[in-house]
Image: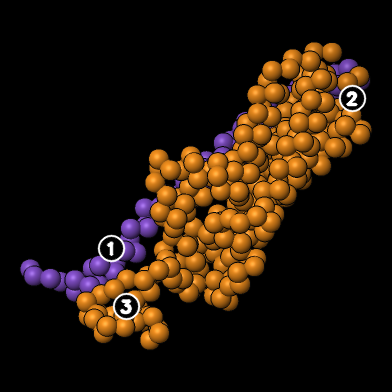
C-alpha cells in the first residue's frame, strides 16, 4: 500500500488529533449531562402535572357536590 | 367548601413558568449548537507552539511566518494547530452561567433573610442546585483544557488545582456548593435550616467575584479572555455560545422552579382533599 499520506502530514494530523480526545470528552460530557438533567426534570414535571390534573378534577367534583 | 382558586392560580402560574423555561431551553440549545458548529467550521484555527517538518508539505495549512522559520535552513516550521482551544467556546460560557445562577441563589438568600418567605428559600436552594450542575460542567471542561493545553498530568492535576489562583478559588466554590447541601441535610428544623442555608449561601457567594477577578489581580496561568482580544471569526461563536449558555442556565433554573411550584400545588390539592 505504501504511504497513502505524506509522513509529514501524518505528523501534523497526529499533533492535532492528540488533543481530540479531550475536546470530544469536554463537549460530550457537557451535552450528555445537560440533556440528561433537562430530560429528568421534564419527566418529573409531566408526572406531577398528570397527578395535579387528576386531583384538580377530584377537588372540583367534591366542591360541586358540596354546593 | 374547599378553595380551589389558589390551586388553579398555581397551575396557571406553573404553566407560564414552564412555557418560558422551555422556550429559553430551546433557544439556548439552538444557539449553543450553532456556536459549536461555528467553532469547528467558520472560526479561525488558533495556533499554539510550532512543529518542524523535514520538508514543505502539500497542505492548505500555511507555514509559520518567515521570522519564525529555522535559521539554519533545515526543514519547514509550521505553527501548531490548537484543537483543544475549541474547549474554550463552551468552558467560558458554562463558567459564566455558574456565576449567574450562583448570584441568583445569593439574591434569593438575601430576600429570604429580609422577608422570611419560604418560596425565597426554595428558589435559593434551586439556584444552588443549578450552580452545582454548571460548576461540575466547568470543572470537567477545565480539566480537559488543563490536560490538553497545559499538558498537566493526572498526577499533577491536584497540585495545579490548589496552586493556580483561578483553579483554586473555583475548586473552593465547588466545595462550598457541596457543603451547602451537606448543611441543608444536617439541620432538621425547617426554619433554622432555611436561615443557616441563606447565611451560608451569601458567605459562599463572596468566592464568586474573587474567582472571577483573581486572574486580573495576581499572576496566573489561566487565560484572561476579555483582555486578550479575539479574531472576529472566533468572537462570533464565543458570543453566541455565551448568550445560549446563559439562556440554558436560566432555563434549567426556571424548569426546577416550575417543578417545585407544581409540587407545592400538588400538596395544596392533597390538603384540600384531606381537609
The percent position of residue B249, horizontal first and vertical second, equals: 65, 49
- CA neighbours of label 1 inside 10 A, class few (<14), some (14 to 19), many (20+): few
- Residue B14 visible, this angle: no
Disc nearer the start of the sequence (2/3): 2
Q: Residue, x 68% and y 20% (percent of image)?
A: B185
Give the chain of mark 3: B
The quadrant holding residue B58 is bottom left
Q: Secondary structure at mark 2?
A: loop
Q: Residue, x 24% and y 80% (percent of image)?
A: B75
The quadrant holding residue B227 is bottom right
Q: CA distance from mark 2 to mark 3?
A: 79 Å
Q: How many marks?
A: 3
* Front residue (pair B251, A2): A2
Chain displayed in orange: B
Q: Residue, x 73% and y 17% (percent of image)?
A: B187
In the rendered structure, find residue B3 and report the number of the disc placed on it: 2
- Residue B111 visible, this angle: yes
The percent position of residue B218, horizontal first and vertical second, equals: 65, 55
Q: Secondary structure at mark 1?
A: helix
In the shown orientation, is residue B99 left or right of residue B79? right
The extreme left residue here reads A1
Residue occupied by mark 1: A14
Q: Colour of chain A?
A: purple
Residue occupied by mark 3: B77
The percent position of residue B8, horizontal first and vertical second, equals: 82, 33
Amino acid at each position: 500500500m505504501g504511504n497513502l499520506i505524506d509522513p509529514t502530514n501524518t505528523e501534523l494530523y497526529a499533533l492535532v488529533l492528540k488533543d481530540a480526545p479531550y475536546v470530544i470528552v469536554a463537549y460530550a460530557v457537557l451535552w450528555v449531562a445537560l440533556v440528561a438533567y433537562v430530560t429528568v426534570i421534564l419527566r418529573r414535571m409531566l408526572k406531577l402535572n398528570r397527578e395535579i390534573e387528576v386531583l384538580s378534577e377530584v377537588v372540583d367534583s367534591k366542591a360541586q357536590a358540596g354546593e | 367548601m374547599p378553595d380551589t382558586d389558589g390551586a388553579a392560580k398555581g397551575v396557571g402560574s406553573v404553566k407560564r413558568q414552564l412555557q418560558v423555561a422551555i422556550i429559553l431551553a430551546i433557544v439556548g440549545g439552538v444557539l449553543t449548537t450553532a456556536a459549536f458548529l461555528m467553532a469547528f467550521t467558520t472560526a479561525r484555527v488558533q495556533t499554539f507552539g510550532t512543529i518542524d517538518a523535514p520538508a514543505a508539505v502539500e497542505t492548505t495549512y500555511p507555514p509559520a511566518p518567515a521570522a519564525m522559520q529555522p535559521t539554519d535552513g533545515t526543514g519547514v516550521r509550521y505553527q501548531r494547530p490548537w484543537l483543544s482551544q475549541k474547549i474554550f467556546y463552551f468552558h467560558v460560557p458554562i463558567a459564566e452561567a455558574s456565576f449567574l445562577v450562583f448570584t441568583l441563589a445569593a439574591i434569593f438568600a438575601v430576600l429570604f433573610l429580609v422577608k422570611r418567605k419560604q418560596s425565597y428559600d426554595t428558589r435559593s436552594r434551586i439556584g444552588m442546585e443549578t450552580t452545582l450542575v454548571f460548576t461540575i460542567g466547568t470543572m470537567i471542561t477545565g480539566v480537559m483544557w488543563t490536560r490538553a493545553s497545559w499538558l498537566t498530568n493526572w498526577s499533577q492535576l491536584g497540585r495545579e488545582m490548589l496552586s493556580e489562583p483561578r483553579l483554586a478559588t473555583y475548586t473552593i466554590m465547588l466545595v462550598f456548593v457541596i457543603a451547602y447541601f451537606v448543611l441543608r441535610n444536617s439541620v432538621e428544623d425547617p426554619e433554622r435550616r432555611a436561615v443557616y442555608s441563606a447565611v451560608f449561601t451569601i458567605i459562599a457567594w463572596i468566592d464568586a467575584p474573587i474567582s472571577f477577578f483573581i486572574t486580573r489581580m495576581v499572576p496566573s496561568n489561566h487565560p484572561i479572555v476579555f483582555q486578550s482580544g479575539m479574531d472576529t471569526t472566533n468572537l462570533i461563536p464565543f458570543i453566541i455560545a455565551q448568550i445560549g449558555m446563559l439562556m440554558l442556565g436560566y432555563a434549567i433554573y426556571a424548569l426546577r422552579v416550575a417543578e417545585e411550584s407544581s409540587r407545592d400545588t400538588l400538596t395544596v390539592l392533597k390538603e384540600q382533599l384531606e381537609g
